[in-house]
Image: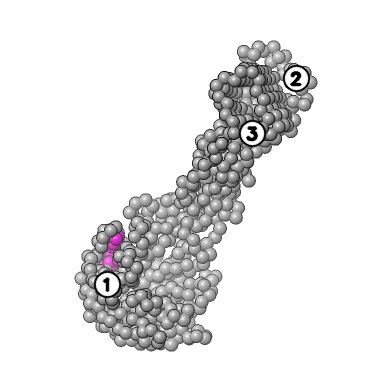
Amino acid sequence: MACAAVAVSGLGWAGAAQAAGFSATTSSVATTSGPGAVAVGDLNGDGIADLVTADQGARTVSAYTNNGGGGFTSSLIGATGRLPNALAVADLNGDGRADVVVTNGLSNTVTLFLKTATGSGYVPTFLATGAFPDAVAVGDLNGDGLPDVAVANSGDGTVTLFLKDSGDSGYTPTTLTAGTAPSGIAIGDLNGDGMPDIAVTNAGDSTVTLFMKDSGDSGYTPTTVATGTTPNAVAIGDLSHDGNGATDLAIADSDSNDVTLLIKDTGDSGYTTTTLPAGTSPQSVAIGDFNGDGLGDVILANSGDNTAEVFLKDSGDSGYTPTTLATGAAPVSVAVGDLAGTGKLDAVTANVFSSNLTLITNTTPQGSSATLTASPASSTFGQNVTFTTALAAKVPQRGAPTPTGTVTYTVDAATLAPTPVSGGSASLATQSLSVGTHTITAAYSGDSNYAATTATITYTVTATTTITGRHVGALTLNSGATLITGATITGSVTIGSGASVDIDSSTIAGALVASHGGALRICGSTISGALSVSHAGGLVVIGDTGDAQCAVNTIHGRSCRPATRTAWWRSTTTSLVPCSAAATPDRGRSPATRRRSPATADRVGLRGQAGRVGDHG
């Protein structure tokens, strides 16, 4: 006996969300004078993303605590040096609390605001940098498990690395030489060797310098790659989804009004360059997955035309679908995070001329995954089988809602009525699968939070006994699952208790009587005698060309059905009566019908109601 085979074709997600573009609502949050930078982080440890701004006009850093209901409460973190122009949020001293680091462009310093152990206060520490520090990033640069700080100094073409000293709050500075006017910086593993590298954009010579960490020591090997004109910012992430990890770069080119994408070539140190046209004077860039499809997207802050621009990665190719949203005046910084607590990636821009933040609340349907399973995993004809589609966000996120909507099942070529999703899943229970291999497809409709997707499996139903060819004499079946296909039975067929029978494209010279049996299918066959089906214990399908895909039969003799079952007949001239009520051979037929010869018998179809394809569990 062969077992049923179940094979999931893979988790599906729809590309339609990319084609539709990014969707969001925007709102404004007033700030202290002239926010020159914004960052996202959980400042109070409540699991909700908060905001931090570098206030150029006031020479301060401010916190905006997220109340979880769409509002933010502002507070002062502390005073900075002159022209605070870049910042980052990270745990700088390993105490589990979020700290803040900000560069002071005209003071040639960086300020570290360390969160106090109690209360909401911060303790500032000032460190000397190179000339005009313009960008900052935090990461473990030497692999000691401690967070280090990297600063791009636009005024002297250098990068200052502050390596955290073990056991205290001090730092050991190291200087690297970059290109002309370095204005953006990011830390990431660019070559997949497990060590953090540094990318620095050089606005003065339109290049990016990649500092690749040398193995075994603290040195770096620099590589220079051309960009667009005046690259002001850089982000590192996975833009190609090619298995190389987060080794690609997105660079905002403010004077050529574009974004340069450097996609890491597989197997070597080279990059493939793609340039996307952008708005006017893009000043800041970030990478994130805005539609939850597992592909990296890009967002820019365009200070020249007061917009934010989202580039959604198209599924299956290298293209992007751009969407532009209005911001406040002169957005010079953009940051991303789940600000609304919905599980979607939101964004925020710092608008230096209008002294406010623009909150971009993501409403784009997220990528969904559908997992289709069968229970039992193997079956014989007549067994009940339940197909279940479990739905979830393709990329799991904290706070992600449970999918709703419907799932439409297709069994081979028959599409069934939609099944409502409940608790993130939808099931189909059926007993009508014929012997053979079937293709089951579950198509999820999507909802306001998730995009549509599909999943497919193959399912094989077996028989314990198969009868083909010519069978001489009567046939009695009392147990098991039997397939009669392409057969000629010269006598009658009797189906007793415990037997399930699938009859296809066969000829029965006598009568067929099924009493107290299991499931019964009769499709595309000829029965010379009477057909009697009474007290069937399972599904009965006789000549249903609908969703059961069972060809009509030719039945020459009288037919009757179980008293408690409803049936559909293809013939309009033949009445089907309960077997227990058949008092005369021709009960229920008109005189004209009683006088017909067997040669003019109707072609009919009968289908039992209970357990039919389309019943939903």
Q: Which mark is residue 214?
A: 1
* Quarter residue 611 falls in: top right
| 1 or 2: tag closer to the N-terminus | 1
Q: Secondary structure at mark 3?
A: strand
- The three-letter amino acid code for the residue at tag 3 is Gly
Q: Residue 71 at what x, y percent from top left?
A: 52, 73
Residues at marks 1 and 3, CA–CA distance in whole angstroms: 70 Å
Compared across the picture, whether 433 is left or right of 454 comes to: right
Q: Residue 79 at what x, y percent from top left?
A: 40, 87
Residue at (57%, 29%) from the top-left corner?
466
Q: Residue 355 at what x, y percent from top left?
A: 40, 76
| 1 or 3: tag closer to the N-terminus | 1
| 3 or 2: tag closer to the N-terminus | 3
- The three-letter amino acid code for the residue at tag 2 is Arg
Q: What residue is shown with label 2?
A: 587
Q: Secondary structure at mark 2?
A: loop
Residues at marks 3 and 2, CA–CA distance in whole angstroms: 34 Å
Question: In the figure, 569 relative to 195: above or below?
Answer: above
Please report the bounds of the magenta region as a residue range.
250-265
Q: Residue 437 at what x, y percent from top left?
A: 51, 36
Q: What residue is shown with label 3?
A: 480
By secondary structure, the bulk of the magenta-drawn segment is best described as strand
Within 10 Å of disc 2 (Cα), the crowding (few <14, some 14-19, many 20+) is some
